[in-house]
Image (tube, rainbow, N blue to C red):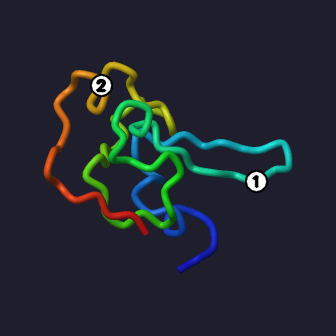
Amino acid sequence: MSNSGPDAIGLCASCRWMRRVTSRRGSTFFRCGRADADPRFPRYPALPVLACAGYDPQSVGDGPGRGAPGGPGAPGAPGAPGEPIEHG
C-alpha cells in the first residue's frame, strides 16, 4: 500500500462525509462529517478505513468532502443502528 492517495485513506477518499483539514503546519487530516451528528463515528478515524457503516459514496456533482447537512446521518435521519463500525 502506498503512503498517499486513496489506498492510504481507504473508504474516506470517496465518501461524501469526508472533510479534508489542513493545519497551519501543512499536515492533512481527514475528518468524518458524520461524527457531528452521530457519536458512533470518530471525528478523525484511523486510516485506512476499510469498512464503515456510515460510508456514503459521493454522488455525481459532489466534490470531495461535501456531505449534505440534511442528508443521511443528520440529526433525525435514519441511521444504521446495530451495524458494526470498523476503522483501520
Please provide percent x and percent y for residue 18.
48, 43
Give the amino acid at mark 2. Answer: Gly
Q: Which image quadrant: the C terminus?
A: bottom left
Query: First in sequence: mark 1 or mark 2?
Result: 1
Q: Residue at x 25, y 52 (%)?
A: 53
In the drawing, does residue 23 fall left or right of residue 63?
A: right
- Check disc 2 and report the residue beneath it: 71
Q: Residue at x 63, y 73 (%)?
A: 3
In the drawing, does residue 17 fall left or right of residue 64?
A: left
Please provide percent x and percent y for residue 11.
40, 58
User: Disc 1 to disc 2, how far (Cα)?
Assistant: 29 Å
Q: Residue at x 16, y 30 (%)?
A: 78
- Check disc 1 and report the residue beneath it: 27
Give the amino acid at mark 1. Answer: Ser
In the drawing, does residue 22 fall left or right of residue 88?
A: right
> Outermost residue, bottom direction?
1
Please provide percent x and percent y for residue 48.
48, 67
Above or below residue 37? Residue 81 is below
> Outermost residue, front direction?
39
